Amino acid sequence: MNILFIMYDQLRFDYLGCAGHPHLTTPNFDRVAAMGVRFTNAYVQSPICGSSRMSFYTGRYPSSHGAQWNNYPLRVGEQTMGDHLRKLGMDCWLIGKTHMHADVDGMERLGLDPDSVIGARQAECGFDVWIRDDGLWAQGPLGFYDEKRSPYNEFLKAKGYASENPWADHANAGVGEENSIASGWMFINADKPAHIHEADSETAWLTTRTLEFIDQATGPWCAHVSYIKPHWPYIVPAPYHDMFGPGQVPPARRDDIELDDTHPVFAAYMNNRVGQAFQREEVRQKVIPAYMGLIKQCDDHLGRILDHLEETGAIHDTMIVLTSDHGDYLGDHWMGEKSLFHDQSAKVPMIIHDPRAQADATRGTTCNALVESIDLAATFVEAAGGEVPAHILEGRSLVPWLHGETPDWREFLISEFDYSGSTVANEFDLEPRDCRLFMVFDGRWKMMHAEGGFRPMLFDLETDPDEFVDLGKTDAHAEEIARLYGYLAQWGRRMSQRVTKSDAEIIEMRGKAGMKGVLPFLYDGSEVPPPLIMHYVGDAPTLPEE
């Protein structure tokens, strides 16, 4: 069985037809949901691109792997899904984005040549690279990233898009008055069509590269297809730019009660530049139709992949996973972007099609279990026929749920956010080590803890599914808060760094020293079975002559 692991960047859990969006139809996402299981309570381990992806790839929490924000290198030695799958005879390939930054210092210290196979894998999250492009080829006073790092930019140049940086001037810009560049960085331009043929857009280009990979691949393989969209800049080529209009923009899910005695960290994000922008209704009315258009485009190109798998018969031996690295506030809770732990940010779509007959009974169903993004790495190991190395992977395999079983499951889930690298950290007189947030969610109660002496935030999603009423403002729910802090403490005591010895190996080594004759602390030898002391009893050997 092969694994097609597709990730979309900044795709909200509720912006899919199968998730109940009132205006956005996504027949191909829905098609996979009809073929498999849609997990309705899937959360990322960090609501920020880089850290979230490192958790997906390692199967470990941010505080375990250490890459807790964007541009934090994943340290040399962290095992990723590629390492685990190759042990089982499965290749693991990247097609698209990772947000990975290599641990250059660590590689130099250990003498790892980045041009060697092992060095390249260390620098690419453990993947072999079919093609990598992280997007966002911004250009400012300091220039922009070397275009050689963007195969997409090179593709556009080869297609005749005349520009030093065609990503900025064509793929993520429209045309304004008097033939001026209408950059997608400005929200006012979000309703313009991107100045590019749709077939040459990022989403179309990456889909074509994916089909090329599938056509030449020999299994078993895992392909991580990682799309750049619908992440900002919010601009999309025709015909997707005007498929949706103001009448299809859902009202902002926010309430004035959130502005009263607001948690300081929450308030800082409300009041930053993106929060203030999305509090303007004219921004939402331009951005959200473009965001929906980007998703519709992603859905159409997903259809290209599904059609190809069906036409070639590969659909019958390919596990398909659809998910996202985090969501997007889009003006809900007075915020834009991601970062905190409301469902708009930390909850993601997760749909899994398992082609095996054992999954037939669950096709077209939903599962409400508390799922963490780190569960996918364990799922892939089991799907590849391996035993999950639980001393390394902190997630749990979802295969039992896919096969209609009801496993003993987690009572709560955790998400983390380190905002020390954000400008929001300037609001507080805190050391970077204290600019950290934790979410504990048990399926009903959601608590956010902030280091640095702040009070917690608390929401009851049973009575307040919109997460408007912060019950942490008073002591009325002290018992619930204490219970959730108990969960956080339990999680904090987990064994996370003993990754070189499995539980089975540790159990097997118990008493082995005695079998080799290491027998300290005995009084007369009667304390242990006779075979252990057989060499140490009987006639004493003779002394050599002097």
Image: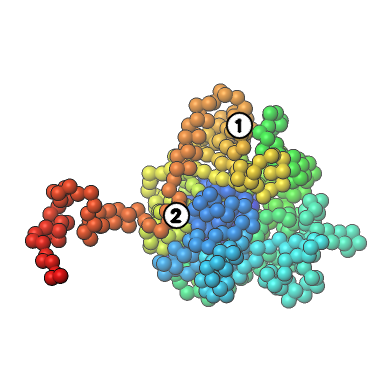
* Tag 1 secondary structure: loop
Could you tell me how many numbered marks the image carries? 2
Dividing the picture into quadrants, the one containing residue 504 is: bottom left
- In front of the other: 260 or 112: 112
Which residue was labeled with disc 1?
455
First in residue order: circle 1 vs circle 2: 2
Q: Quadrant of the N terminus?
A: bottom left
Which residue was labeled with disc 2?
393
* Residue that lies at the very extreme toward the top in this rendered image: 476
**Number of the front mark, 1 or 2:** 1
Point out residue 274 in the picture as x, y percentages from the top left corner: 74, 46
Q: What residue do we see at 62% from left, 68% from top?
A: 132
> Marks 1 and 2, Cα distance to the nearest angstrom?
32 Å
Is 495 situated above or below 464? Answer: below
Left or right: 525, with 243 as reference point = left
* Residue that lies at the very extreme toward the right in this rendered image: 178
Q: Amino acid at mark 2?
A: Leu
Point out residue 153 in the picture as x, y percentages from the top left corner: 72, 70
- In front of the other: 284 or 165: 165
Q: Quadrant of the C terminus?
A: bottom left
Point out residue 438 in the picture as x, y percentages from the top left corner: 56, 41
* Tag 2 secondary structure: loop
Residue 374: mark: none
Residue 506 seen from this side: yes
Point out residue 374 in the picture as x, y percentages from the top left corner: 49, 52
Give neighbour class at mark 1: few <14, some 14-19, many 20+ (Cα, 10 Å): some
Q: Amino acid at mark 1?
A: Arg
Left or right: 39, with 261 as reference point = left
Q: What residue do we see at 79% from left, 63% from top?
A: 142
Left or right: 143, with 357 as reference point = right
